[in-house]
Amino acid sequence: MGTFPHAFSGVWFINMANGQASLTDTGFGKTTRRDAWWVQPLLTFLGLSAFIGYSTWRAFMGQDFLAIQDGTNYLSPFFSPILYFHPNLSWVSDEVRNAMAAHAWLGTMPAWVPLWVSPSFLILWAPAGFRFTCYYYRGAYYKAFWGDPPNCSVGEPRDSYRGEQRFPLIFQNIHRYFFYVAAVFI
């Protein structure tokens, strides 16, 4: 390894060694790595699965999303903004019902919509679609959910790289469109 002086104020550069390591034994999950490479994808899988499960459960609940106390209001982000007001919600107090009616963007919910369809179903799909197709998160959940690639220097599930050309990863290409829809709710 050698060094040479740079022309600017005593800065030195170090020539780094180059090398390529290849897998001696190929196949899904095969590697010569000795660290716990599988922990990060596992934790990402567990964390995102827990969040998806919790948010789906909260969306189905359709209650306890607006708190009013002493003139202050708190609206859960899962239900924000209030799109429709449903007058037949028996578990909602009069104070919350009046606040919802005053702030609903589209007025009263149509009578044909069942009670179990909470406002969050009308809202969450847009920000969730934007977030789950986000470029930043792709590396994390490609490893966690699809195992493609499982991690750096770890054998892939197939011999050739397909990228985002086939199901399910082709859906990642709609990210730019989800932004415009999600921006409506921000």
Image (tube, grey):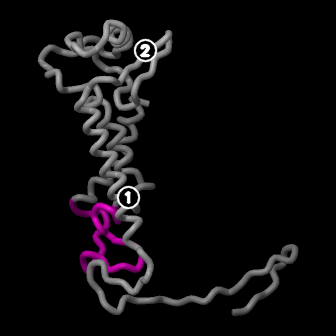
Callout 1: SS: helix
Q: 183 or 108, which is in the foreground?
A: 108
Please tell me the numbered disc located at residue 68: 2
Q: Position of residue 63 (x, y in %)?
A: 28, 23
Task: Report the side of 17 relative to 97 (left or right).
Answer: right
Q: 136 or 6, which is in the foreground?
A: 136
Q: Is residue 37 above or below residue 45?
A: below
Task: Report the side of 80 relative to 6 (left or right).
Answer: left
Q: Residue farthest to the right? A: 9
Q: For residue 35, what is the image quadrant? A: bottom left
Q: Does the magenta stretch include residue 152?
A: yes
Pointer 1: residues within 10 angstroms few (<14), some, or many (20+)? some
Q: Position of residue 147 (x, y in %)?
A: 30, 68
Please tell me the numbered disc located at residue 44: 1
Q: Residue farthest to the left? A: 112
Q: Which kind of residue does numbered mark 2 sit on?
A: Ile
Q: Distance between the residues labelled 1 and 2?
A: 35 Å
Rendered-image quadrant of the C terminus: top left
Q: In this view, does 120 lie above or below 89?
A: below
Rendered-image quadrant of the N terminus: bottom right
Callout 2: SS: strand
Region of the chain picked out in magenta, as a range:
142-167
Q: Which of marks 1 and 2 is nearer the N terminus?
A: 1
Q: In this view, does 48 lie above or below 95?
A: below
Name the mark nearer the viewer: 1 or 2. Answer: 2
Pointer 2: residues within 10 angstroms few (<14), some, or many (20+)? few
Q: Where is residue 176 in the image (x, y as percent from the top left)?
A: 38, 46
Q: Position of residue 41 (x, y in %)?
A: 37, 64
Name the residue at 43% across, 14% down.
68
Name the residue at 34% across, 71% down.
149
